[in-house]
Image: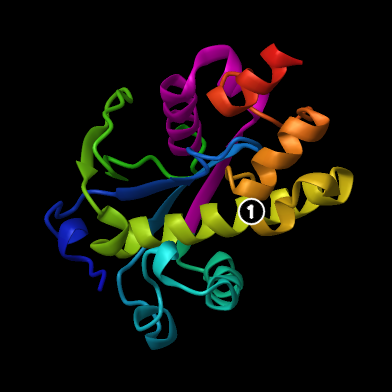
Amino acid sequence: MPSFEIENQYENKIVCGTDEAGLGPLAGPIVVCSCVFLDYNLPTELLININDSKKLTKKKREFLFDKIINYENLIYKISIIDAEIIDSIGLSNAWKKGIISSVQNLDVNPDVCIIDGIRQVHIKDKIICPIVKGDQKSYTIATASIIAKVTRDRIMQKIHTEFPEYGFEKNVGYGTKFHIDMLKKIGACKYHRKSYSPVFNVISIG
């Protein structure tokens, strides 16, 4: 379960937790969230429920999302990097762009950024600390993971209404068999990442 143990190592510093959703899908954006808790005395309802978004049911994520974004002692910022930008600058640079944007646009100026995973990014005047499985260790990163995941899922639901053929309401852009079969059958839509090989291969053949 997450805790504030990592955050508490940085005494008297503002700590920002960052996570993303959507690095692997064939369609849709990468969504990055950075957040800061103004204090660590969370309500019990949040303390016992916040966790890595992948370990929560969709219903639980949705429930927590609404509680979290309305929590008065949380500051957060979301950055959305669409498929066109991912194709233009590459996945790694797109991820960095999302991280930097979400951190720099926070309404507070964090001293430390703890980031889920192993990737490195440079943000001027910030201590950057990648944390392996950070969304399972840190409440701040876990909170960012929930906000990013729910935000992205909702975006994919909207995209589904425009392009229902690909089953985005269920696969949220990931390369399921059904999704790949439909790509081969009808080609890609404007939300597909054309630089990703399953999509690129279909376009090349077409």
Question: Left or right: 49 with respect to 165?
Answer: left
Task: State the residue position of label 1.
Answer: 171
Q: Nearer the viewer, residue 65 or 177?
A: 177
Please give the name of the residue rendered at 45% of the width and 30% of the height, measured from the top-left corner. 95
Q: From the viewer's perspective, is residue 56 above or below residue 76?
A: below
Q: Residue 121, percent across and down?
A: 31, 26
Quarter of the rendering occupied by the C terminus: top right
As drawn, which residue projects farthest toward the bottom?
A: 44
Residue at the spot x=35%, y=84% of the render?
A: 48
Question: Position of 21 compared to 172: left or right?
Answer: left
**What is the quadrant of residue 54 in the picture?**
bottom left
Q: Residue at x 79, y 34 (%)?
A: 185
Image coords of residue 117 (percent x, y): 28, 43
**Residue 76 counted in the magenta span:** yes
What type of secondary structure mainly makes up the magenta span? helix
Across and down, in percent, residue 189 comes to 79, 30
Residue 36, position in %: x, y? 39, 54
Q: Which residue is located at x 40 percent, y 83 percent?
A: 43
How would you rate the neighbour count of disc 1 (Cα within 10 Å): few for under 14, some for 14-19, many for 20 or more?
A: some
Q: Secondary structure at mark 1?
A: helix
Residue stretch in magenta: 75-103
Nearest the eye: 115 or 30: 30
Q: Amino acid at mark 1?
A: Asn
Say left or right for 14 vs 10.
Answer: right
Based on the displayed image, in which of its 4 quarters is residue 39 positioned? bottom left
